[in-house]
């Protein structure tokens, strides 16, 4: 599904069914050449998508992290050095200067759609 806005073209990619996701856990999907960690948090009735690359360990591991919350903010803890990243914003809770990219997510007819920026645009 591709939508055109005044400023850019937005590409929505059908990644999987919501039922394919484990509650309160992550999976990694290769979408348009990017490793994206997808988290289904049923308690929030939400699915989140962020870059799988952990800037502290320099490894693609965030999809294997533990989910939880810090002060009401849903987070994933990196399985390597345990830094927490906001599932909403990608911001590192321990170092506000670092973050991982986040991607808009839609659920349509039970399918998870992730918006991917066009080449050359920041995630």
Image: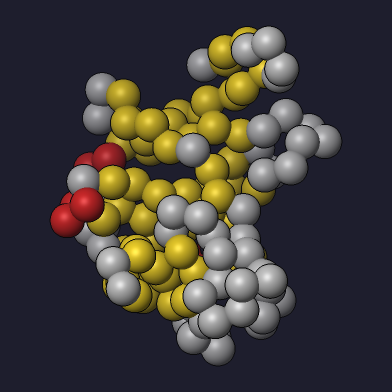
Q: Is residue 91 above or below residue 79?
A: above
Image position, residue 112 (x, y; %): 37, 35
Q: Which coloring applies here?
A: secondary structure
Displayed quadrant of residue 95: bottom right
The residue sitting at 38% across, 61% down in the picture is 26
- Residue 103, quarter of picture: top right
Residue 32 lies in what quarter of the image?
top right
Q: Position of residue 106 (x, y in %)?
A: 38, 31
Left or right: 84, with 100 as reference point: left
Examine the rendering and report whether any part of residue 71 can be seen. yes
Residue 63, placed above or below residue 116: below
Q: Using the image as rendered, state which of residue 67 and residue 23 is in the foreground.
A: 67
The answer to whether 92 appears left or right of 34 in the picture is left
Residue 83 percent across, percent down from the top left: 52, 82
Position of the C terminus, as image quadrant, is top right
Residue shown at 55% from the left, 50% from the top: 102
Residue 15 visible in image: no
Answer above or below: position of 42 versus 32: below
Q: Is residue 25 left or right of residue 51?
A: left
In this view, which residue lies farthest toward the bottom? 81
Relative to 44, does residue 61 appear above or below in the rendering?
below
Number of numbered discs? 0
Q: Can you name the residue that lies furthest to the left here?
A: 43
Residue at (54% x, 60% y) in the render: 90
Question: What residue is shown at x 30% (from left), y 53% (from top)?
Answer: 40
Q: Position of residue 43 (x, y in %)?
A: 17, 56
Would residue 120 be found to the left or right of residue 107 on screen?
A: right
């Amino acid at each position: 599904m591709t939508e055109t806005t005044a400023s850019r073209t937005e590409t929505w990619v059908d990644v999987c069914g919501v039922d394919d996701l484990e509650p309160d856990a992550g999976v990694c999907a290769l979408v348009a050449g990017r490793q994206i960690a997808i988290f289904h948090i049923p308690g929030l009735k939400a699915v989140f998508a962020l870059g799988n690359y952990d800037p502290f360990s320099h490894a693609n591991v965030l999809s294997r992290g533990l989910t939880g919350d810090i002060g009401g903010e849903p987070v994933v803890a990196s399985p390597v050095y345990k830094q927490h990243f906001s599932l909403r914003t990608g911001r590192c809770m321990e170092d506000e200067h670092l973050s991982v990219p986040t991607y808009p997510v839609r659920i349509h007819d039970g399918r998870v759609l992730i918006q991917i920026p066009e080449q050359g645009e920041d995630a």
